[in-house]
Amino acid sequence: MGRGATTNSIPEIENARFILVIGSNTTEAHPVLALRMKKAARNGATLVVADPRKIWLTKLAKRHLQLRPGSDVWLLNAIMHVILREGLQDDAYIAEHTEDFDAVAEVVARYTPEEAEQVTGVPAADIVATAREYARERYAAIFYTLGITEHACAVDNIWSLSNLVLMTGHLGYESTGLNALRGQNNVQGLNDAGANPSYLPGYQPLEDPELRRKFGERWGVEVPETPGYRLDQMMSGLHDGRIKALYLIGENPVQTEPNAHHVEEGMEGLDFVVAQDLFLNDSNRRYADVIFPASSFAEKEGTFTNTERRVNRVRKAVPCPGNAREDLRIVVDMAKALGADWPDYRTPEDAWNEFADLAPLWSGIRYDRIEEVGLQWPCTDRDHPGSPYLHAPHPSRPSGKGKFYPVEYQPPIEQPDSEYPFVLSTGRTLYHYNSATMTMREEGVVQKQEDPFVEMHPEDARALGVAEGDWVRLVSRRGELEARAKLGDRVYPGLVWMALHFAEAKVNWLTHDVGDPLIGTPEYKTSAVRVERVGGAIRPAAR
Amino acid sequence: MIRVGDTMIPMARTVAFTLDGQPASAPEGELLVHAAARHGVFIPTLCHDDKLEPYGGCRMCVVGVEGSPRPLPACATRVAEGMVVSTDSSVPQYQRTLTEMLLAEHLNPDPGGRPNELVDLAEELAAEAPFILPDAKREPYDDRNRFMGYDPDACILCNRCVRYTQEVMQCSALSLEGRGPHARIVPTHGYSWLDTECELCGGCLSACPTGAIYEKFEEGTERPERTLEKVKSTCTFCGVGCQIDLNVDPETQRIVKVTSEPHYVSNEGNLCVKGRFAFNFVHHPDRLTEPLVRGEDGELHPTTWEHAFRVAAEGLLRVKEEHGPQAIGVLSSARLTMEENFLIQKLARTALGTNSVHSCEAT
C-alpha cells in the first residue's frame, strides 16, 4: 500500500467493531496495547483470533481460527474467496483506489473454504463467518506481527492481508486498517532513520541518484551507490568471505539469528569485530576485538518512534555507570576516529534536525513540538498536526492507488517427517525481552519464568512418557537443546512451541535459516524437530 | 455528531442544572463529579477511578441533590436537566466524618510515605482519627513475589485494585475476601500473586489510592516516595511506546520505581510487568563500565576510550583497505534512539563507505 508502518492509531482500537488478530500474541508481546482490544471486546466488538496456539486473547474471542503454522495464505485467500463469492467486496473503493484487482480475483477463486479446511485445519464454516463479519463491518481492523512475517513466505502473507484490506476498502479512516505491531521499542524509528541497506533515511530509495546527491551535499561526501547487504546476506557473507568485519551495536546474533551454530562458525572467521553494548553477551564476549560500554535508555536524551508512528521523547534520568558513554557520543567519536569530517552533534536534537531536514515526511516534527505529547508522521511542516491514520483520502503509493498482488500458497520449507515429526514454532513471552540479557537480571521476573520451557500437547506428552515439568530434548537437523515440558492445550498435537529468550537453550540452534526470497526474513515460525525424553524432572547438568 | 460503535448519534444534548446556587450546564449523562470539576468545584473521591465503571462505594463524594432523600455519590450520579446540586451545606461535614471513620480503622494509615489520597484528604479537611477501633489491626499479608507488597492496615477496601483486574485486565487475579475487620484484598483463592493468573502488571498498585498495594523496591529505602524526582520518558520494552515517569532518588541517582499517568497518550497510565518493574538492569553490576580491547592473550582488557577508538578505527580501516568497504557490515539496534540510528547509518555510509547497515529488526 506504500508505507512500512501501522495504518492506524492505538487509541482508535477501542472503537473498532471487528478485530482480527492474526499472528500476534498481543497480550504478551504488546500487553498495554492489548488492553485496548480487551476494551473493544468489552464494548461489544467482535474479536477473531487466527493463531496456531490458543493464546490468551482467544478467551475473549468470538472465534479462534487455529490454523497450522505457515498456512496463512490459504486462510486469507479463502476469506477473500468467500467475500467475492458473496459479493461483499467494496466495488467503489476497488474501482477508484486500487489496481490489478482482477489478478487477485482470479487466484482466490480457486481457494475454496472447504479445501482451506484441509490445509489450514480451520473449519470452512468459521472461514465463511469471519469473511462475512469482516467485510460487512465498516470499523474493522486487522492486527498482525511476527506470526505473519517470520516465514519464508513473509511477503506473500503481507500481500494477502493487504489484498483483503483493499478489497473491502478498510483503509483511510478511523478504527480500521492493517496494523503491523512493531516488536521492539524503536523498530519503527530505526527503519525511519535509514538503518537499512537499500533506503536512505525516511524511506528514500538509495537507487535514486537525485536523492543520493541530496544527502551527499548535506553530508559533504558522496553516498555510495552500491546497495548494502541485508542482515541475512551479512550472515551468509560470514561464510563465503564477503564480510570480514562487523560493527555490532546492541546486537547478539549468535542468540537471535536462525541456525545459530552456523552463525557462530561464521563469526569465528571474521578479521575484526567492534561491539557496543550494555552487557557482555555470547556474541561480543567471544568475538569482539573492541567493546564500547554503552548507555541504557534512562541515561540519554533522544526519541523512540512507536508502532503508531508517534515520535516520543526519551529523557536522561540517571548518569551512565563508570566510564560508559551515551551511544550518540560513541558513534560521533568513532566516526571522527575513522577520519570523517562531521559536525559536533552536541545534542541529539542536532542529529534529529539533520534527519528532519532531509526527510520530508518528518520535517514538521521538532523537539519543541514533542515535549508533552509525541507527533505521528507523516508531519510535513511545522503546522501539520501529525497523522493518526494513513492512506487518506487514498492509498499512499505514488499512483494514489493500492496495488493487488495475487499470491499462491507455498508450503513451509521444512515439513515434519518420520525422523523429525513435530512442527516447532517460536515466539516471545510476557516476562522476557529478546535474548533476556536485561530481564534475566530481574529477580522478580526470573521468579515467574526461569527455566527454558517447551509447550506441548498432553497427548504427545503421554505418547512420549513425559510429565508436566519434565526435561525433554528437542532435536532438529541443526542442533539440540533441553527444556522443561509445559503441557496444555495452547498447542495442538504435533505442534511444539518455545520462546527465544533462554541463553542456555537457544531455540535458534534448532531453527533453519532459509528466509523469504525477497526480504530475507527468517522462518522462525516453522521448523521440524523431534522430542526425546531425558529422564524426568531433574535439571540436566549445565551444558 | 459523535460515533458510538458503528452508528453516528447526535451529540448528547446540553442540560442546565444548578450547582451551589449557580447556573451550570453539562452534556446530559455526564458524571456529576466531572461536571462539577469543569465548573471549578472539586469533589473529593477515593474509590473513583476514571478508568473504571462508576462504583459509588466509599461515599466520600456525596453531594446534596434536591428531592433526593439522602446525599448521592457524585462519582456515580449523572447530571439531568434541572438538577439542583449542593456541595456547600452539610457536605463538608459528611466528608470529615467519613474521613475520620476511615482513619479510625487504621493503626498507621500512612506507611512508607507513599502517595496517599486519604492522608491528603485528612489534611485538607483537618480531620483526625477520633479514636482507633479496637479491631483496627488487620492481619498482615506476606507474599513471596518480589515486586508487590500488600499492607492491609493501609487498605480502605475501596476495591479499585480488584475492579482494575476485572475491568481493565479482564482477569481474576485479586478478590475482596472476608467481612468487617477481617476483610482484605487477596490474590484469588488465597494463592500467592505468583500462582494466580496475575501477570504482575502492577495495575492494582497504580489504582490504589492509599499505597496499601506497593512496590517492594521501596522497602529499606529511607526516602519517602513523595520526594522522588520524576523524569518523563518512553518505555523500552516493546513498540507500544508507553509514556512513563522514571522516579529517581536524587541522592543515589538511581531509578527507584516507574509510574505513569492516566492522561499519557497511547497507554493511559497502564503498564506491563516489564515496563513497571524490569528497570533494574540499568543499575546492574554486570553493566559494562570500561572500554575493552582484546589483547594478544585472547582476553578482553579494560582500556581508555582513546585507545579503544584507535584500535577500533585501525581494525575497520585495515579491513576496508584490504577488502573494500563492502566487506564491513554494521548491525544497529532498535534499542537505540532514532538519533543514534541516524548517525550509525551515516557512519556506515560516510565514514566506512558502505550501505550495509541493518538490524535484526528487519522484519
Image (cartoon, grey):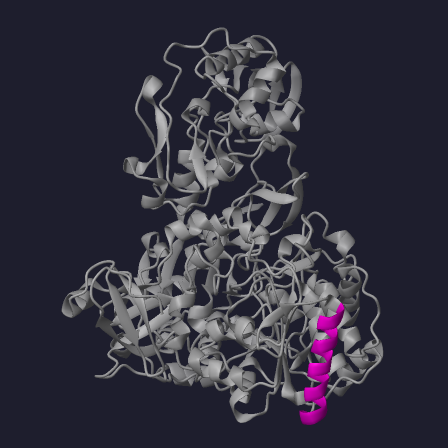
Q: Is residue B229 left or right of residue A26?
A: right
Does residue B330 sit above or below A54 in this rendering? below
Q: Report if residue A380 lies within the magenta region.
A: no
Q: Position of residue A177 (x, y in %)?
A: 52, 64
Q: Residue at x 79, y 68 (%)?
A: A354
Name of the residue lying farthest toward the top: B130
Whether residue B264 is visible, yes or no, is no
Q: Position of residue B187 (x, y in %)?
A: 34, 37
Whether residue B232 is visible, yes or no, is yes
Q: Is residue B222 left or right of residue A56?
A: right
* Quadrant assignment, res A505: bottom left
Name of the residue lying farthest toward the front: B297
Q: The magenta stretch spans which residues?
A: B306-323
Q: Residue at x 60, y 47 (%)?
A: B244
Q: Main secondary structure of the magenta part?
A: helix
Does residue A281 sit above or below A296 in this rendering? below
Q: Quadrant of the C terminus of chain A?
A: bottom left
